[in-house]
């Protein structure tokens, strides 16, 4: 399993916008420079995030992007799915049938059970994480995320 570039950079862009504490928005050129990404790629990802309702664009000379919701309302699991989709979905088996039209294991597949379990576990964990949990410095965020993981393991 891999985190795609679109998921990584999209989340970084959303985090950059969330950390921008000025009254005005942060522009595509400012995000591009801060994240080391092309302006075109930032524009593509901000469009995805805007269409999903996570950010708004502010017009004008000092315009740019701002969060459309509070950072505490933005669920990281949903953001990741908007940026790249779930790790596993029911359509997965249709997408990988091999050279046949229907997977030879479509009736009895223990691997599908593994992917479903992984997706369920990832969903349960990421559903507990908000953008607010990631806004602080790495050490503080790491402690907070460890506590979320510990709560998940013990429940």
Image (tube, helix red, strand yellow):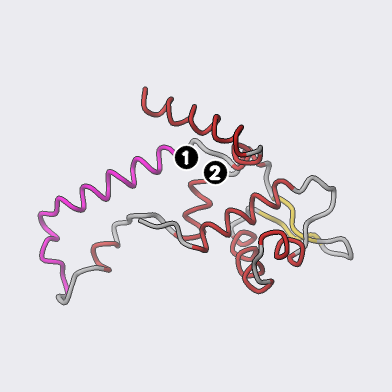
Cβ atoms at labels 2 and 1 below 8 Å apart: yes
Judged from this view, the residue extending furthest toward the top is 154
Residue 123: image quadrant is top left
Going from N to C along the chain, the mark reached first, 2 or 1, is 2
Q: How crowded is mark 2: few (under 14 residues within 10 Å), some or many (20 or more)?
A: some
Residue 117 lies in quadrant = top left
Quarter of the image that includes the C terminus: top left
Eyeballing the image, is 123 above or below 140? below
Name the residue tied to disc 1: 127
Q: In this rendering, would 21 be left or right of 15? A: right
* Pointer 1 local density, CA inside 10 Å: few below 14, some 14–19, many at least 20: some
Residue 52, position in %: x, y?
A: 58, 58
121 versus 152 height, above or below = below
Where, quadrant-wise, is the N terminus in this rendering?
bottom left
- The residue at the point 18 percent across, 53 percent down is 111
For residue 15, the mark is none
Left or right, residue 12 beside residue 123: right
> What residue span does the magenta drawing correspond to?
101-125
Judge from the rendering whether residue 125 lies leftward or rightward of residue 133; answer left or right: left
- Residue at image x 12%, y 61%? 105
How many tags in the picture? 2
Q: Which residue lies furthest to the right in this view?
A: 61
Measured as percent of width and height from the top left, residue 47 is found at 63, 66
Q: What element carries label 2?
A: loop
**Residue behind mark 2:** 75
Residue at 24% in and 67% down: 94
Element type at mark 1? loop
Distance between the Cα atoms at labels 2 and 1? 6 Å
Question: Residue 119, position in %: x, y?
Answer: 34, 47
> Would you say residue 99 sits in the magenta stretch?
no
Q: Which of 127 and 33 is in front in this view?
A: 33
Q: Where is residue 11 in the image (x, y as percent from the top left)?
A: 58, 53
């Amino acid at each position: 399993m891999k985190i795609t570039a679109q998921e990584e950079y999209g989340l970084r862009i959303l985090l950059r916008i969330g950390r921008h504490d000025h009254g005005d928005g942060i522009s595509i050129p400012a995000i591009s420079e801060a994240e080391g990404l092309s302006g075109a790629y930032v524009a593509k990802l901000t469009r995805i995030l805007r269409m999903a309702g996570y950010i708004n664009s502010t017009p004008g000379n000092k315009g740019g992007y701002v969060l459309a919701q509070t950072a505490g309302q933005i669920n990281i699991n949903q953001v990741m799915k908007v940026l790249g989709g779930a790790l596993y979905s029911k359509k997965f088996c249709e997408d990988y049938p091999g050279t046949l039209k229907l997977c030879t294991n479509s009736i009895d597949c223990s691997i599908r059970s593994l992917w479903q379990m992984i997706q369920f576990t990832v969903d349960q964990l990421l559903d507990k994480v908000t953008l607010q949990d990631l806004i602080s410095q790495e050490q503080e965020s790491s402690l907070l995320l460890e506590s979320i993981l510990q709560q998940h393991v013990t429940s």
